[in-house]
Amino acid sequence: MASEEKRSVDEKAYAVETASADSLPSYEEAAVTTGAPTEKISPLGYHVDAVSVVFLNISKMIGTGVFTTPGSILKGVGSVGLSLIFWVIGYFFAGAQLAVYLEYVSYFPHRSGADVAYLEKAYPRPRFLMPTVFAVQSVLLSFSSSNAIVLAQYLLVAGGAETTPWRVRGLAVGAYTVIVLIGIASTKWSLRLSNAIGVVKVLTLLFIAITGLVVLGGHTSVVDPHANFRNSFQGTSSNGNGLATSLVKVNFAYSGFENAFNVVNEVKNPVKTMKRYAPISLTIVFVLYMFANIAYFAAIPKESIRTSKELTASLFFTAVFGTTRAVTALSTLVAVSSFGNLLAVVIGSSRIIRECGRQGVLPYPRFWASTRPFNTPLGPYLLKWVLTVIVIIAPPAGDAFNFIVNLQSYPANVFSLLLTIGLFSVRKRRLSIGAPRAEFLAWNAVLAFTMLVNVYLLVLPWVPPEGGIYAGDVSFFYATYCIVGLAILGVSGAIYALVIIVLPKYGNYTFRQLLEKLPDGAQTNRLVKVPNSQLAEWDATHDEQGDIIDPTTDRPVQAAVPAQ
């Protein structure tokens, strides 16, 4: 059972939480804790084992990226050689970011939601700012339309049907509805299905990799499998926009290495499990990605890959096997991979939204925190479904895929940069209270590399592409996704300023958080408006987490979470 004690250092109070018998305590600065309460016993259960950690990450990383983006990456960098180097750079960048997450989880082993929880801890001041900004952008960008559309496209190719825009959209909505219903029904069985599909993903890429080696050996009908590897750096682009856009897409293909951190409070011995298995999942994916790309370049002419758009893998099977059955089989496997990706994404992102709701900055926090009636986060799942369906149906066909991928990546890079910088603040606060060395500590050189790449990803997309401002990977202004991404962050900041600063000033009240404990064992904060005339009384009878203080013991009235 987790234990908690209060410590006073330099007139500040700190909460010391023991994560488990075999891990170091988690020191949290109670005096600035304004986020979601720590659920020391997970109301969602403990269904995430080591295998699920590996395949939650693998299933999110191996979705559609390696099957669909090699063409656009090659188009951006200009050469086969640099394209392969970018996949290596993406691996090292993902590994550096993974080190950041591993250090955070060693500090806060009871917090699911990854970014939402860690940003809250890294930036406790101004009060409620980071939870509000992250929650607004998370809600606005909480859709998985891109991969749902690709899933529908491959399903139609596998079935030999015509891929009309509305047929693709209708099938995408139907498939995504099934995925969300699976997540709602059972965490245990959705994880088992995700694991099973993860195995299929790995076997599919292994098959492509082995087939590529056979092609390179000259044992297929491909005339010259070495053609793309001669003068492999010929045509390398020096345009910053193309290089940045390509790195964004490579980064998108590796995004998912952090997915298991979204459910970390549902993992037993989370720190040891994450340290051991998260790097394994990333390395497996890197090796498969490299061999898959080599296979593509061995079998498909360079120009065909450049113009392949979202169907690079289909071109590969056509070039190697030349039969409709082979293409159908490949399309079926890619569709299964896309299905598993969406399932892994919806499991992880539902926990992100739940944590945003538990911080109290979203309306109806009990709705987001509740695990009833199926012991799953129903509210976040429903929000994901509604937003994804809207984005599938509303945007015009054509440029939507590239635009949405880039749009979702840009604010994510902003938060990734803030997350890395914030680690130094967390370290400083731990040092000030004499906390012991964390079970995992990222090298400063790794943090510097992560920050530099994030700055690159934020700055270089503004450089105009060759051919003018309409020559990007969309038919409209090349930096539209940057503008929209920053606008979303601006809207988030404006909402914070209006709701948390301006309205309370003129309404003569101050926001305080109130801890609520639900019957299912879930806990959430709710922001309440306390009149300024009653503020002193409120602060005297509630602690920083919003729990009521027993005046006789000077401790919370209900310190323990109901056992599950």
Image (cartoon, helix red, strand yellow):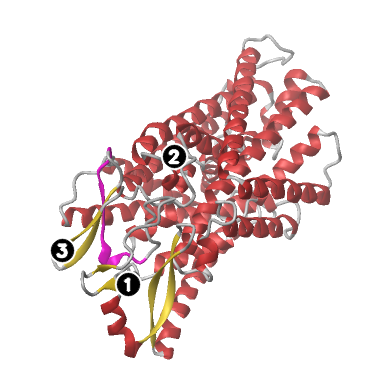
Mark sitting on residue 415: none
Count of residue discs = 3
How packed mark 2 is, by other alpha carbons closer than 10 Å (few <14, some 14-19, many 20 or more), is many
Residue 15 point in image, percent of width and height: 25, 58
Q: Which residue is mark 2?
A: 94
Residue type highlighted by circle 2: Ala
Q: Which residue is mark 1?
A: 548
Residue range in magenta is 22-34
Q: How far separated are the C-alphas under marks 3 and 2?
A: 38 Å
- With 386 as the anchor, is 417 left or right in this view? left
In terms of secondary structure, where does tag 3 sit? strand
Q: How far separated are the C-alphas under marks 2 and 1?
A: 42 Å
Q: How far separated are the C-alphas under marks 3 and 1?
A: 19 Å
Outermost residue toward the left in this view:
10
Q: Nearer the viewer, mark 2 or mark 1?
A: 1
- Give the residue displayed 78% in from the left and 28% down from the top: 328
> Between residues 193 and 340, which one lies in front from this camera angle?
193
Q: Which residue is mark 3?
A: 8
Q: Answer whether residue 288 is magenta in the image.
A: no
Of pointers 3 and 1, the one earlier in the residue sequence: 3
Image marks 3 and 2: residues in contact by CB distance under 8 Å: no
Residue type highlighted by circle 3: Ser
Residue 497 point in image, percent of width and height: 44, 77
In terms of secondary structure, where does tag 1 sit? loop
Of pointers 2 and 1, the one earlier in the residue sequence: 2
Residue type highlighted by circle 1: Ile
